[in-house]
Amino acid sequence: MAIVDACQRFEQDAKARKLSDPTRYKYTVLFRQLKEFATGKGIRFLAEIDVDALTAFRAGWNDGSRSSAKKLGRLRTFLRFSESRKWINSNPARKLKAPRFSVRPTLPFTSEEMPKILGDGLSKYAE
């Protein structure tokens, strides 16, 4: 199965599954990048994509850690879709580790605003 054809079939399936427009757009971006990478490396078929190729592909991403993790998830989903249809024997993206990132909770109010909201009882904790 050619990469171009597999991407097109996945996009048709995503539309049939009624995935949201923003989600489908993210796959479109991923597929455009994958096709550009594959063309540059002389890769035409899904079966030619291995872990080393995916590692090189991911190295070219300019995304932050969280966005890279999400994109890797989309890549794994696409290759799992391809594997389930027997276009490839196994999903090489499963062997890629996701980037590490920390989640920092966002508070709705600053430490200066909290005493004003809760009154004097909390002012000693704001210091």
Image: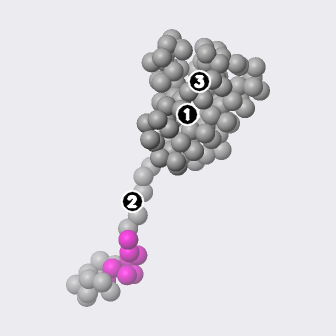
Residue at 58% across, 47% down? 64
Residue at 42% across, 57% down? 104
**In screen coordinates, is 75 left or right of 106?**
right
> Residue 62 at x, y = what percent?
65, 44
Q: Mark 3 — residue?
A: 6
Q: Which residue type does callout 2 highlight?
A: Pro
Q: Mark 1 — residue?
A: 11
**In screen coordinates, is 85 left or right of 45?**
left
Q: The residue tagged with tag 1: helix, strand or loop?
A: helix
| Magenta highlight range | 108-115
Q: CA distance from mark 1 to mark 2?
A: 34 Å
Q: Mark 2 — residue?
A: 105
Looking at the picture, tell me which residue is in the foreground, 105 or 87: 87
| Labels 1 & 2 near each other (Cβ < 8 A) | no
The colour mode here is one colour
> Residue 42 at x, y = what percent?
76, 20
Label 2 Cα crowd, 10 Å radius (few <14 / some 14-19 / many 20+): few
Q: The residue tagged with tag 3: helix, strand or loop?
A: helix
Q: CA distance from mark 1 to mark 3?
A: 9 Å
Label 1 Cα crowd, 10 Å radius (few <14 / some 14-19 / many 20+): some
> Residue 77 at x, y = what percent?
47, 30
Up the image or down, 62 lies above or below 16; here it is below
